[in-house]
Image (spheres, grey):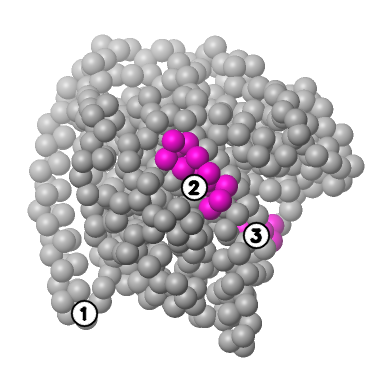
Amino acid sequence: MERLTGLDASFLYLETDTQLLHVCALLIVDPAADGVEFDFDSFKAELGRRLHLIPAMTRRLHNVPFNLDHPVWVRDSAFDLDNHVRRVQLPEPGGRRELAEITAEIAGQPLDRQRPLWEMWVVEGLPHGKVAVISKYHHAIVDGITGTNMMMHLCDLEPGVTYSPPTEIAAPEPEPNDLLLAAEAALKFPGKLGIFGMVPQTVGILGGLVQRRRGNGSRGMPLPFTAPRTPFNRAITPHRSVSFVQSELADIKEIKAAFGVKVNDVVLAIVGGALRSYLELHEDLPESSLIASVPVSTHDTSRHEEGTNKVSTIFARLYTDIEDPVARVQAIAEDNRGAKEEHNLIGADFLQDWAKYAPPNTFQLAARAYSSLKLAEHHPVVHNLVISNVPGPNFPMYFLGVRVASMYPFGPVFHGAGLTVTVISNNGHLDFGFIACEELVPDVEEIADAVPEVITELLKAARERC
């Protein structure tokens, strides 16, 4: 038995029927690349032989009575792989649009909280004998880094690798005693008052930021609630639209080197350029810059050892109000340098420190009220979208024995920010995954299709500069 941290549990509390807080990944694997025969039953059996390496995939939630404390994880004694792995055929004509539609449909379905919080869908019928694997994990059990680490247990460095069944079967785990859990929660209640100690700490942090900006005249991070409103900054429905595109990592690095910036600066500039094109096309481009929330991993800097999600966030201007792509990437890079300094002042554990005091019932009631009343449409926009850049493998990987050709990640979308872009590096490629609320961005493929054009424009400018 293991208790969820406040940050992990917050993804459960903030989930509603429309705001689904799981993450997805679309893997396109290519059996023909190495002459490997793909067989669904063998694929599924190999997955089963590796599950003991990933405890999160065989444990389920157990709630504390009356939600007096965060839930605990317990090993699922009734675990059945058939409840988690499904097989479907891609509809004709079997192209990118059909694959995006089936991915969106799966992303728009909630996970069953009575079982371990993951699913895997095998999609056959892709061109050239390729197969798609759509995996879905609740954010309570993964973040960018832990999700990548989890994937590594299911991948190898060569094709056709098979594991032996585990030599020891874990003994059944008794169900937690609800009376003891409730009593423990009552004893811990005085510790929740520590939230009042966070207030002066937060005020001190804000004071330090103000002094920094006055001292050096820096612009720093944009403030939340200052983003312009766009068509996707409204309350969301459970329906999703998805698109994806692959680029060459070498092109991104060439742009990075030419302008003396970071890869993440280039990624933000590419997304900003694609969004500028999209919003111009729809005559909805705001005069001021869009603002993105950019998750930052704190796995290497957090003082908290427990928990899955170790993340903070930086707010970043995308400079969608700047037409020139070179000026845009340079402005983003300058902002990000100051934002990182301010993020260091705030501290890696700011979100985790606040979340550990999160009262479950209050959070859940607030999330439901916010959703049902569509409050996201009645206050200034916190941020326009989420953009996450996750490091991936820089060498060929074989998922359960089959070569990975593409790996497109999709994060959750939120009320008030109905578009999320997630990017991962993968063996010389940079794979972009776009997911949105379907009613707010029904044509999300137009944003994805603009990505190669923006990269080409930046690459041309980079080569002219040399």
Q: Residue at x 19, y 67 (%)?
A: 209
Q: Secondary structure at mark 2?
A: helix
Q: Is residue 37 left or right of residue 382?
A: right
What amino acid type is highlighted by mark number 2? Answer: Gly
Tag 1: Cα neighbours inside 10 Å, few (<14), some, or many (≥20)? few
Tag 2: Cα neighbours inside 10 Å, few (<14), some, or many (≥20)? many
In the image, residue 399 sits, relative to residue 336, either above or below, namely above
Between the C-alphas of marks 2 and 3, the distance is 20 Å
Q: Nearer the viewer, mark 1 or mark 2?
A: 1
What amino acid type is highlighted by mark number 1? Answer: Gly
Q: Are marks 1 and 2 in contact (CB under 8 Å)?
A: no
Between the C-alphas of marks 1 and 2, the distance is 34 Å
Q: Which mark is residue 217?
A: 1
Q: Residue at x 72, y 39 (%)?
A: 95
Tag 3: Cα neighbours inside 10 Å, few (<14), some, or many (≥20)? some
Q: Secondary structure at mark 1?
A: loop
Q: How far from the left and from the top, in percent, is residue 194?
A: 14, 41
What amino acid type is highlighted by mark number 3? Answer: Ser
Q: How far from the left and from the top, in percent, is residue 28?
A: 71, 42
Q: Which mark is residue 440?
A: none
Range of residues picked out in magenta: 426-447
Question: Residue 424: within the magenta?
Answer: no
**Residue at numbered disc 3:** 247
